[in-house]
Amino acid sequence: MKNIFLSTVVAAAALTSCSTVSSILQNTFPYSATVLVTSGSPANTTLSAVSAAQSINQLTGSGANVKDIRASNATLSVDSNSSIGMFKSVKVYLSSNGGQEVLVASREDIPDNMGSSLSLDVNSSTTLDAVMKGGSVQQRLVYVLKKSPTSDLTVKTSVGFSSVPITN
């Protein structure tokens, strides 16, 4: 009888800790994606690029143990010899398996004198459970350039999330 009780306590603790660990993983490691803005891309035109988002969460499957997933922060960065100031505006959308896209971050009227990294305005009002638990996550970056780049530009986006553990 003592072994059954002890086994039950250990199993309950393991299940609870799995959800907590999953929540920590979800909240700590961002989804990042890299896209290429090619030289000669037209200015003052809405353009977009799609990339698979990558995170440790995909490898561990931690999304299954969390709920109420929301974007908490987002950044856009370019090569150190470039400037974010060449963008007029950016929007970051996430979707799962080609499903409905959800706007997670954006920034309008980006100043000219920016460095190589920019914090984006996050849309934290929408829960992303369906997207993050729906399979392979892809990101679409929609942007408008102020001027046409003279060389290819690597753009990296990083989106961090908040979530809570599922406790049954």
Image (cartoon, helix red, strand yellow):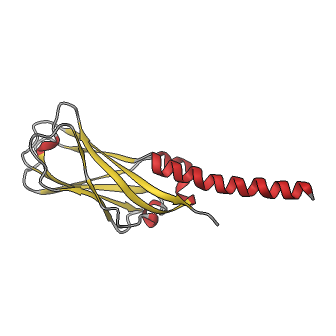
Question: Where, by quadrant of the figure, is residue 9 drawn?
Answer: bottom right
- For this view, does 109 lie left or right of residue 14? left
- For this view, does 157 lie left or right of residue 165? left
Q: Nearer the viewer, residue 36 or 26?
A: 26
Residue shown at 33% from the left, 65% from the top: 102
Q: Nearer the viewer, residue 111 or 61?
A: 111
Residue shown at 23% from the left, 34% from the top: 79
Question: Where, by quadrant of the figure, is residue 98 drawn?
Answer: bottom left
Q: Nearer the viewer, residue 104 or 47?
A: 104
Q: How many marks?
A: 0
Q: Quadrant of the N terminus?
A: bottom right
Residue shown at 45% from the left, 67% from the top: 130
How far from the left and from the top, in percent, is residue 168?
64, 67
Residue at the extreme top of the image, as rendered: 81
Question: Where, by quadrant of the figure, is residue 70 drawn?
Answer: bottom left
How far from the left and from the top, in percent, is residue 48?
22, 55
Q: Nearer the viewer, residue 6 or 41?
A: 6
How far from the left and from the top, in percent, is residue 8?
80, 58
How far from the left and from the top, in percent, is residue 149?
11, 41
Residue shown at 52% from the left, 49% from the top: 24
